[in-house]
Each structure stands twice: as structure tokens, then as C-alpha cells.
Amino acid sequence: MNWKKHVLEGNPFNDYFIFDVHGHIGKHKRIELLDSDAENLVASMDRLGVDKIAVSSFLSFTGDWVAGNQITEQAAKRFPGRVLGYASPDPFDEECDLSPYFESDRGFCGIKIHGLEQGGTPMNDRRYFPAYELANRLELPVLFHAWLPHEVAQVVDVARQFPRAIIIMGHAGLTAFASKEEAISACKKYDNVYLDTAISETYDGSLEYIVSKVGADRILYGSDFGTFECTQTLGKLALSKLTDTEKEKILGINARNLFKL
Amino acid sequence: MIEFLDAKCMIGRRLQYRENAPKTNEDFLELMDRCNISHAITFHSVAKEEAISLGNQLLLDETKDNKRFLRQWCLPIKFHPAEFISEMKQNDVTSVRMFPDTFWYVLENNPTSGIMSILGECRIPVFMDADELKADAVYQLCTKYHENTFILTHPDYGNSSKYYSLMEDCGNLFLGTSNFLDHNGIKYFSKKFGADRLVFESGLPIGSACAAVSLVCYADISVEEKQLIASENMKRLLSEVNL
């Protein structure tokens, strides 16, 4: 595969299985997003050759968890097999129970936690534990917003306490050197920790560095699609110095195995 | 394949440590080859992060062996405009960048008062990062110095439509793409203003050249529009420089 030619001609990635584990749909309270509904997301996936995406609606973790999870469910039902849903809990609602979302085929594949948006609640707070216990029992993926060092540390604490849950550190702690090193340490220490590639701005060489430390098996392709254009992370991975096998694993093979698809 | 001309590249040794990040000019050139970037408009990190005049001098020293780095000087705080332009000409410097916030320029006086008119006469593009000045200040500059070409690099992520009103009001304003990340942002911007108001920028070494070229290559616009953004717009602006 001539990745340079492929990307620089803007060719779709139809020959590869691509599973984006980090997407969003719906409106955001601060960022005026364009085309962030499920229909436009899938249209872009078709154009680019992305097979599947796992999404959470912004509303599910910024405001109304019931209405937000319903938006996610509707998207998953509208595009079965293409769009999978993350359900989000409300840490302040004692009635919140995510288990019904996983009792029948409602299109949910895991849980999304964004402590910063969820009232600044630390992600290792006990108010999230019912969701983590569910993930631990069902061996579900839990996607975390793990941007800064203290967020990575919170996620590590969850990984330690819930070893059967599949812990995905969104953004791989990439924004600061210290958080990246902590994310790498977490992968080495806990078998249930994985990192995703979603990041709005990062430098060339960072992905190769992380793969050299933890191996390609622990990295998942994630883009923050809906918020951001997924092509930046896709192209960055495609044009990296990683081997074809490493790229294929990250693009989708790892996620397919983890999500039991 | 789409060929690129990078509108924002910063060379030079920096204190900030980033494991496996591009550091040397050879690293930059390897990345440029990988991403089909023929040339890069380049300033020096010391000019931005330490001392402007020293950085401008280091740029000359460190780019003397490679014409793929198109020299860009940062506007000093105190200088004689005519002498500055003369030195630019002597040293084949074809654009300038300013940091009103970092170096606390008073925009109505130095350095913009005398220099802007001369830069306009010479058609020398003026670059500035979006986080260096407020929208009001961009508007004031663009309308007061309407003969000049201004390029706003590194726009705020995630919300390209916030720049629409500025682009409508300021026909001499261009926008860089390095942080132009919102879904279909390039498509809608091009529909509204035409692809000739965008210029490709990598933001190296802080930004990723691989990610930046991919944003353009996979934008939902025509190949012709992609090529305009990738290099043709910037080539045209540079071709107008008359030193």
C-alpha cells in the first residue's frame, strides 16, 4: 500500500476495516457544530470508507442523560451496524441506571464518561460506580475523556478497581508530556487499558512513540468525529511511520476484537 | 497527488520537550517529503518565544542551505520600517509575522503605523495567529490597511463559522487551515467564500503535517479547490511580492 499516494489523492479507505471508537452526535452547548447529526456523519463515513463508529450524544453527558441517550439510541437504530452507542450516566441522579440499555438489542456497545462535562465530577468518584460495576459485569468498553494528567490518574484508578471493564483512554493523554507517560504506564500495568488516537492537535511522531512503548495492540482509532473532522486522525495514522500491520490493527482490528463484533 | 506549500512552519531548537517530535531541519524536510510539501513559509522559534531580532538572524543562518524554507521575519517591537524592508530584500525574506499579544504591540502605533503602509505597497503578506489578537483588532487592521494582505493562522479549533463575519467584512483577509477541524468546516467555508480565501498550514512542529494535509485532501470539495488551498493561493500571494 502506498499510503502517501493514497492520502494525497484523497482516496477512501475501502480496503481496510475502520472502526472509529470515539464519535459524537448532536449539538454542543459551546461549539457551534456543522453536520453533527447521524445522517451527515454516516454520509461522511461512506465517502471516506469508515465502516463503523461508536458515538455518544453530547447531551447525554452535558445535561439530560435520558434525552441524550435517546438521541444516541435513535442514531444506532437508524444505522444498525454502522453506528453503535455509548450510554452515559448522570452522576448526580440516584435513579440513573444504565443496565436497561444493554438488556436488549438497543444498539449500545459501551459507556461514555466525561468528568469535565459531567459537572467536573472526578471520574473515579463513587457516583459513577454503578456504571462501572455494570461494565465490569458485562465486560463492556468504557470510553473516558482522558486529556490531562489528573484525568489520566482518575481513569487508572477505575481500571485498577474494575479489571473486567475495558478501559479506553480517549485522547490517550496526549496533550501534555506527563499525561502521555502516565497513559503509557497505565497500559503496561493494567491489561484492560487501551488508548485512542482522538486528539485535536498533536505533533508528528507522537503516535509512533506511543506504539513503540505499548505496542499497536493497545491503540484504537478514535477521532472525536462530529466535534472534529475525522480525516486528520485518519491521515495522521495513514502517513505515520508505523508498519502496515500496525496501522490495520489500530484502524479497526483491535476494536473489532474488543467490542466482540 | 496534491502538492502543498506550507504557510506556517517554525524551525529552531526549543526548550519544550516532546518525545520523538521533529526537531532538526532534516526532520522537517523528511516530513515535508512524506506529505508532499514542496516549500514552507518559515520563521524561527526564538523570534516567537525568546527574542525577535535574534530569532530573525538565526533564521537566516539556519535556512541558508535550503531554498525549500521560504523565509519569514517576525516584526520587531522597535525598528526603522525602511531599513527593515531593505534588510528583508537583501536576505530574501518575503513575508512577515507579528505577535501583538506575545510582545504587547500597540497596534495603532509601533509596529503597524509606519510599516504597514510599506508592506502594503510591496504586497508583503502579514501573518498572525488567531490567538494573538481579538476579532475587533483584526477588523481594524484589515479595514485600515486595506492594501495589505493579512493571513490569520491557527484559527480557534472546532468552530470555523465564528470567522464568517470577519471574512465577509475583510476581503484582504485569508484563513489558515492547521486548526480548521470541525466536521465539513472546509466544505462550508469554501462554499460561502470560495476556496481562494483559505491557505494550507501545517503548524509544524507543534501541529502535525500529516494531519494537516489530510484535512485538505479529504475535504468534500473539488480537486481544483483542494489544490487552490494546498498551494495555489499562497503561491499567488507570494508572486505579488514586490521588494
Image: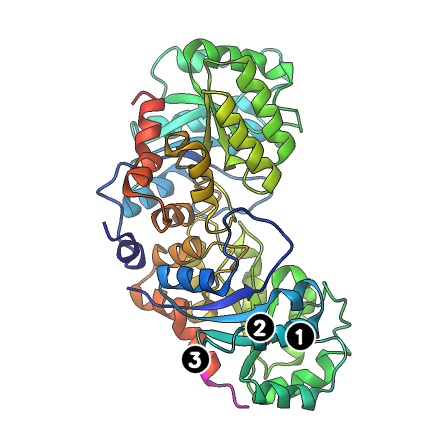
Depth check: A80 or A110 in front? A110
Left/right placement of residue B109 relative to residue B184 reads right
Q: Residues within 10 Å of mark 2 (few under 14, many from 20)?
A: some
Please check the rendered image and state whether residue B241 is part of the magenta-colored stretch, yes or no. yes
Q: Residue A216 placed where, x, y %?
A: 38, 34
Name the amino acid, label 2: Cys
Name the amino acid, label 1: Leu
Magenta range is B239-243
> Looking at the figure, which quarter contains the N terminus of chain B?
bottom left
Subunit that carries the residue with mark 1: B
Label 3 secondary element: helix
Name the residue that disc number 2 marks. B170
Q: Residues within 10 Å of mark 3 (few under 14, many from 20)?
A: few
Q: Is residue A147 visible?
A: no
Name the residue that disc number 1 marks. B141
Query: Marks 1 and 2: which is nearer the front?
Result: 1
Label 1 secondary element: helix
**Residue at 58% across / 73% down in the picture?**
B59
Task: State whether the magenta stretch is mostly helix, strand or loop.
Answer: loop
Of the residues under marks 2 and 3, which one precedes in the sequence?
Answer: 2
Name the amino acid, label 3: Arg
The answer to whether the residues at label 1 and label 2 have Cβ atoms under 8 Å apart is no
